[in-house]
Image (spheres, rainbow, N blue to C red):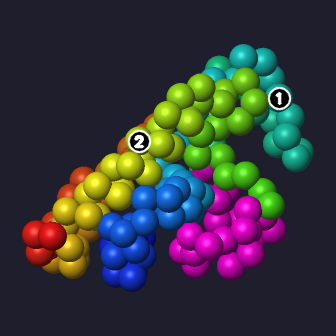
Amino acid sequence: QVLQHPDIWRRCAEDQAWCGKVVEEMLRHSTILTPYRVITQDVEYDGVRIPAGTMVCFALPLAGRDPAAFPDPMIFDPERSYTNRHFAFGKGAHVCIGQHLARVQLEEGLHLVASRLANLRVTGPVERRPFLGAGGLRSLPVAFDPA
């Protein structure tokens, strides 16, 4: 998403603190985690019986785009006011204990890369990996000007 907004990329190069807002919005908008669990006992949910042993996947990337939770969820907006927390790092018993370190690393990494690669742009087709668990990009051809 950041590559579709050159103004955001330029600001990331100049303002490391603002990168934190960009990272938070990336986590909400484009979460890569699709966790799965195996049902340990029969469950009925909304009139559907799910037998023990069934593997279920939780589409967390869709949760961050729920219009009931986030106004204009398809718009990538680092200045978004968060009244609801996204699920990029899980929740409850399954929350990522390294989430704070990950956020700091993402923020600093985004700032460092943006400050070194000016005018970053996509130069070809972007391919995603069709993978349950942790998805992501298969290819992202880019060009840039050295900063």
Kindly report which numbered mark, 2 or 1, lies closer to the viewer in this rendering.
2
Disc number for residue 105: 2
Label ID, residue 33: none
Residue 43 tag number: 1
- Along the line of sight, the residue nearer the viewer: 39 or 63: 63
How far across and how far down the image is residue 49, in percent?
Answer: 81, 35
Res. 132 image quadrant? top left
Residue 61 is a magenta residue: yes
Asked if residue 50 can be seen in this view, the reply is yes
Q: Local crowd at mark 1 within 10 Å, few (<14), some, or many (≥20)?
A: few
Mark 2 vs 1: CB contact within 8 A: no
Quarter of the figure that contains the N terminus: bottom left
Q: Judge from the rendering whether residue 34 lies leftward or rightward of residue 46; answer left or right.
A: left
Say what amino acid the circle numbered 2 marks. Gln
- Spatial CA distance of label 2 from label 1 is 39 Å
Quadrant assignment for the C terminus: bottom left
The kind of residue on which mark 1 rests is Val
Q: Nearer the viewer, residue 91 or 54?
A: 91
- Is residue 143 at all visible to an observer of this figure? no
* Mark positioned earlier in the residue sequence (2 or 1): 1
Q: Measured from the top left, where is residue 119 in percent x and y?
A: 21, 78
Q: What secondary structure is the magenta-colored segment mainly?
A: loop
Residue 40 located left or right of residue 28: right
Q: Position of residue 4 (x, y in %)?
A: 37, 79
Where does residue 133 sit, x and y in percent of width and height?
Answer: 46, 37
Would you say 89 lies left or right of 2 here?
Answer: right
Where does the magenta region start and end?
60-82
